[in-house]
């Protein structure tokens, strides 16, 4: 089956003239979903689960003044902040990026090529309509989160999911490229066009369709279209996560993405740091990890504490 334009890419429509503050498109999408957004330390910041602030846009390296950073944490009552930097110390991290114009089936790892060709025979790729996402999206969200052993109520609760979809359709920079089998939604992405970058924010799929590789087709189609768009500089497929995800890492590399390294800087609110970042607190987290070794939240907490210990301005 064929696929057509799936990601809006009109620079003027997406306010990519340079007059907008970097990160403003994604910030607006998050704000409409009820997230707190603040401008400080030369960047936009938004709340993420866990009452942390994360800097926007994801690819912008920061070097904030420590005093201003601490003031922002206190004034916003955040538990901490996370931002990418090459001038601070922090966790070795990075984000997945694809640059360049040449991209076709031959660009993929040899194992992915037959999977994409197989999926092309079973699915259609097109933008998902609002009603399709509202009516079918929750099922894909729950299926994906169950496989990943996590749960996010914004994706799992119908009313909150509808709010996210409404927010996306209210923002000109947000798109929902998707894969369909007839009228059935098999996989979808949430993407954000931010100036000359396209960010892949989320990707969900239905368990029963996985044998026909809808995710492979969607990743390939979005990447191929972006590579052909001369107004785009790069596609970002997200951060290296704070928990072990070897399969996902390999998946992205096999589609031609590379890890652009940086240090992930984590600064905690002083009260939280005093509570958790001492021998008793660290021992409690280690004990919980031993009891529930596959819990992504505990692994993330352990990584955050490690990041807070090693992060600082040089």
Image (cartoon, rainbow, N blue to C red):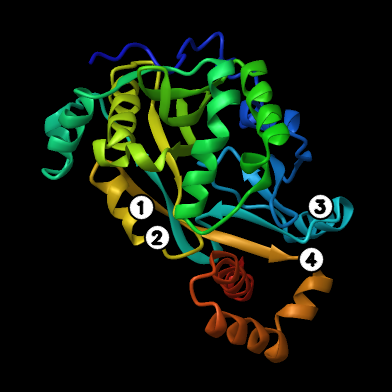
Position of 162 relative to 112 (above/below): above
Task: Say few, some or many: other residues with alpha carbon within 10 Å of mark 1 (under 14 / 14 to 19 / 20 or more).
Answer: few
Distance in Å between CA atoms under marks 2 and 3 = 31 Å
Label 4's element? loop
CA–CA distance between discs 3 and 4?
10 Å
Mark 1 against mark 4, which lies toward the viewer? 1
Check disc 4 and report the residue beneath it.
269
Mark 2–mark 1 contact, CB under 8 Å? yes
Q: Is residue 67 left or right of residue 103?
A: right
Residue 192, disc:
none
- Precedes in sequence: disc 2 or disc 4: 2
Q: Quadrant of residue 112?
A: top left
> Pointers 3 and 1 in contact (CB under 8 A)?
no
Q: Are marks 2 and 3 in contact (CB under 8 Å)?
A: no
- Residue 72, labelled with which disc? 3
> Quarter of the image containing the N terminus?
top left
* Measured Cα–Cα span from mark 2 to mark 4: 28 Å
Work out whether residue 181 can be spotted: yes
Q: Earlier in the sequence, mark 3 or mark 1?
A: 3
Above or below 254: residue 268: below
Residue 248's label in the rendered image is 1
**In the rendered image of this protein, does residue 201 appear above or below residue 3?**
below
């Amino acid at each position: 089956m064929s696929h057509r334009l799936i990601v809006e890419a009109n620079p003027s429509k997406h306010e990519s003239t340079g007059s907008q503050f970097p990160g403003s498109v994604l910030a607006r999408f998050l704000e409409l979903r009820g997230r707190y957004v603040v401008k400080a330390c030369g960047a936009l910041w938004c709340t993420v689960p866990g009452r942390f602030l994360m800097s926007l846009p994801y690819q912008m390296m920061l070097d904030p003044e420590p005093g201003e950073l601490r003031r922002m944490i206190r004034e916003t009552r955040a538990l901490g902040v996370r931002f990418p930097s090459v001038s601070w110390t922090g966790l070795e991290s990075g984000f997945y990026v694809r640059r360049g114009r040449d991209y076709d089936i031959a660009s993929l790892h040899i194992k992915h090529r037959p999977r994409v060709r197989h999926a092309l025979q079973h699915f259609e790729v097109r933008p998902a309509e609002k009603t399709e996402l509202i009516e079918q999206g929750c099922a894909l969200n729950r299926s994906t989160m169950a496989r990943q052993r996590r749960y996010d109520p914004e994706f799992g609760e119908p009313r909150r999911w509808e709010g996210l979809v409404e927010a996306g359709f209210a923002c000109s920079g947000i798109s929902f490229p998707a894969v369909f089998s007839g009228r059935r939604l098999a996989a979808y992405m949430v993407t954000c066009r931010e100036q000359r970058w396209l960010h892949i924010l989320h990707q969900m799929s239905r368990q029963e369709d996985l044998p026909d590789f809808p995710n492979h087709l969607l990743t390939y189609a979005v990447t191929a279209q972006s590579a052909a768009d001369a107004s785009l500089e790069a596609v970002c497929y997200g951060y290296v996560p704070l928990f072990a995800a070897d399969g996902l890492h390999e998946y992205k590399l096999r589609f031609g993405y590379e890890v652009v390294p940086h240090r992930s800087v984590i600064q905690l609110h002083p009260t939280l740091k005093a509570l958790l970042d001492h021998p008793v607190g660290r021992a409690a987290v280690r004990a919980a990890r031993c009891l529930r070794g596959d819990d992504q939240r505990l692994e993330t907490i352990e990584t955050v504490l490690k990041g807070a210990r090693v992060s600082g301005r040089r």
